[in-house]
Image (cartoon, rainbow, N blue to C red):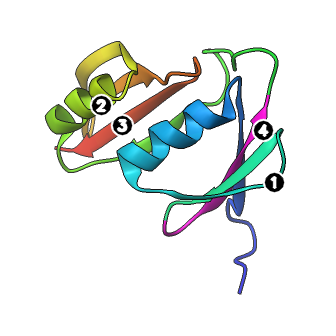
Amino acid sequence: MRAENRIDYIEIPATDLKKAEEFFSALFNWSFQNWGEEYTSFNDGQLDGGFRLAADVAPATGVLVIFFSTDLERDVERVQELGATISEPIFPFPGGRRFHFVDPTGTEYAIWSAE
C-alpha cells in the first residue's frame, strides 16, 4: 500500500542511461527495467525511481539526492573506482559526516553517515 504524503518515486535526469545503470548497479546492486531508449526504472530495495534521458546534466544547484552509508571511506573508494569524481571530500556536519560525488553522467549526489 502506498503511503500518503511521502516521497513515492524519484526521477533523475541522466545524459547517458547505460552509464547511470551500470554505475548504480555496481555501486548499490540496484535492479533496473528498461522502458525504451529514453527511460529506465530502478528499485533500491525500498524506493522505486527512474532515470530519464536528458540533453543536459542536472544542475549542481538543484535537488541533491543523499544516500546513507555505514562506511564513508569505503564508499569514497568505491565511487572513484566506478568512475565518479569526488566533488566534496568527507566533511563533518551536526549529526554525522558526508561527501559529495559526481557520477559518470555528470550528476552530483552525496553519501552520509551518522557520527
Q: Earlier in the sequence, mark 2 or mark 4?
A: 4
Tell me the number on the disc at residue 98: 2
Residue occupied by mark 3: 111
Q: Nearer the viewer, residue 35 or 64?
A: 35
Dot 1, crowdedness within 10 Å: few (<14), some or many (≥20)?
Answer: few
Cα separation, mark 3 vs mark 1, equals: 28 Å
Secondary structure under the numbered disc 1 in the rendered image: loop
Q: Which of 2 and 46 is in front in this view?
A: 46
* Amino acid type at image mark 4: Arg
User: Do the residues under discs 3 and 4 have CB atoms within 8 angstroms?
Assistant: no
User: Do the residues under discs 3 and 2 have CB atoms within 8 angstroms?
Assistant: yes
Residue at point 59%, 22% (across, down): 105
Residue occupied by mark 1: 35
Residue at point 33%, 30% (across, down): 79
Q: Closer to the camera: disc 1 or disc 2?
A: 1
Identity of the residue furthest to the bottom in this view: 1
Cα separation, mark 3 vs mark 4, equals: 22 Å
Q: Earlier in the sequence, mark 1 or mark 4?
A: 1
Cα separation, mark 1 vs mark 2, equals: 33 Å
* Amino acid type at image mark 3: Ile
User: Does residue 68 show up magenta in the picture?
Assistant: no
User: What is the x, y in percent for residue 54?
Assistant: 80, 25
Residue at point 70%, 49% (across, down): 50
Q: Earlier in the sequence, mark 1 or mark 2?
A: 1
Left or right relative to 43: residue 7: right
